[in-house]
Amino acid sequence: MRVSDLSRHAGLAVATVKYYLREGLLDPGTATAATQATYGDEHLRRLRLIRALTDLGGLSLRQVHTVIDALEEADPLGALRALDARFVAAAAAGTDRGSADDEVDTFIDGELGWKVGADAPGRRLLADVLVAVRGSGRDVDVAIFRPYARAAGWLVTEDLEAKDVSSGPHRAERTVVATLAADAASIALRHLAREHLGSGRADRDTM
Amino acid sequence: MRVSDLSRHAGLAVATVKYYLREGLLDPGTATAATQATYGDEHLRRLRLIRALTDLGGLSLRQVHTVIDALEEADPLGALRALDARFVAAAAAGTDRGSADDEVDTFIDGELGWKVGADAPGRRLLADVLVAVRGSGRDVDVAIFRPYARAAGWLVTEDLEAKDVSSGPHRAERTVVATLAADAASIALRHLAREHLGSGRADRDTM
DNA sequence: TTGAATGGAGAGGACCACTATCCAGTAGCG
DNA sequence: CGCTACTGGATAGTGGTCCTCTCCATTCAA
């Protein structure tokens, strides 16, 4: 496989593939001559992964790099956590977060009793949400997350049970894409459900 | 209120506020002299809305503009639909979408029986997800969305019932922020739930 | 009165994700 | 063998976004 094949199969311009090579998102092919190299299926798979991360997940190439690094270090949890980067970051600076972080920690560790790392990005993300909603003028309590937590817990158990254990190769990679897909799907379906159930009162308050 | 007050209360640089004014995201204040104008609470509210949309929702200023336009035309459904723009778009071009769109339509209209507009962006988004997952090498069926649809339906009814009908001012605006918040929260909680429930098997397949 | 701030406008900059151009070195075809 | 097309590699340039900087005549607050 040469660059042009890679390009054709992945639906990307050759220049773009070269760019990814330069950026270290894609490993160099095995050189066969001074100006020749061949690429394999793993390169194509990588390209598809990159596009899934950028197109479906909206990740920047820098974030894609983080995910890929984690995958290559056989750190699936790190890879999944890296997906949260697209939501956090921005809101972090400036605003006074008040006790939002503490409230969220209490909610997760206490009320829900979930065992998650103290550095799980979801914590900060939830706190950001709290801060943002309060900043927009509503005085909400952490407890507002309860139904979402219940739905999330149910969905994940459902997922884990229904799963073909498929310990095939590239597990972690597929898990990452699946997580992204699940994220997008759950949002899409919530919006559709709201349009379906809330017709005629779309101007009503939610959450 | 002058620009500097606006800037301070919103936590933005004065130059940024001026930029938003130039871009038409913020209405001009009421002029009191050749080089003087005053701004009101609605300007501050608008600024907070803009930052919620960009920071929490990750919308571009162009997309923010779309949302704001819809809000000003008293079109809450349009405003909510505009939120989906951050997911769609990218994946649309190039790839052969196959029958994904049809499958999704059948799923929504037939299996779920949901009444949503034919042009609801959630449809296309779901199809994109399908295309992306398949492109990354898994042969999935639309039915995979079923649990997500169930969770979404439950969450939205929960929302609509629990809601204080609060027909106060700026309903639609708050609904938009609430939707964004709900999106982020449901993702954060799903990721946390997975970390909690799936510990030791974080490398297992999901969705 | 004097220093700081204002509205308005334009230029400039930083970053991102490419895209274009150039080049010497192959590859494959007839 | 010659010819064209393509290759890897490198550098420079593009278009877009989101600000940030600078300038200006005017106005306000001390």
Image (cartoon, coloured by chain):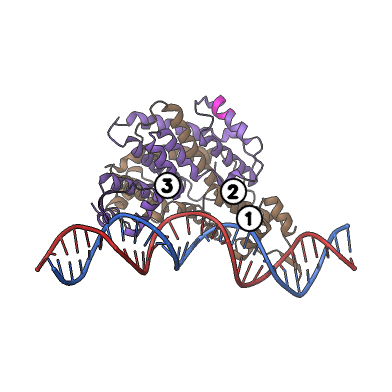
Chain colours: A purple, B brown, C red, D blue
Q: Mark 2 falls on what kind of element?
A: helix
The residue beneath circle 3 is: A57
Q: Residue at x 36, y 57 (%)?
A: A16
Residue B113: x percent and y percent? 36, 45
| Residue range of the region highlighted in magenta in the rendering | A106-110
Q: Mark 3 falls on what kind of element?
A: loop
Mark 1 vs mark 2, foreground winner is 1
Residue A192: x percent and y percent? 43, 47
- Cα–Cα span, label 1 and label 2: 11 Å
Establish if B72 lies above or below B141: below
Q: Amino acid at mark 3?
A: Gly
User: Which label is found at residue B46?
Assistant: 1
Query: What is the chain identity of the residue bearing mark 3?
Result: A
Query: What is the chain identity of the residue bearing mark 1?
Result: B
Q: Is residue A204 magenta?
A: no
Is B23 placed left or right of C20 in the picture?
right
Q: Mark 1 falls on what kind of element?
A: helix
Mark 2 vs mark 3, foreground winner is 3
User: Which label is found at residue B174?
Assistant: 2
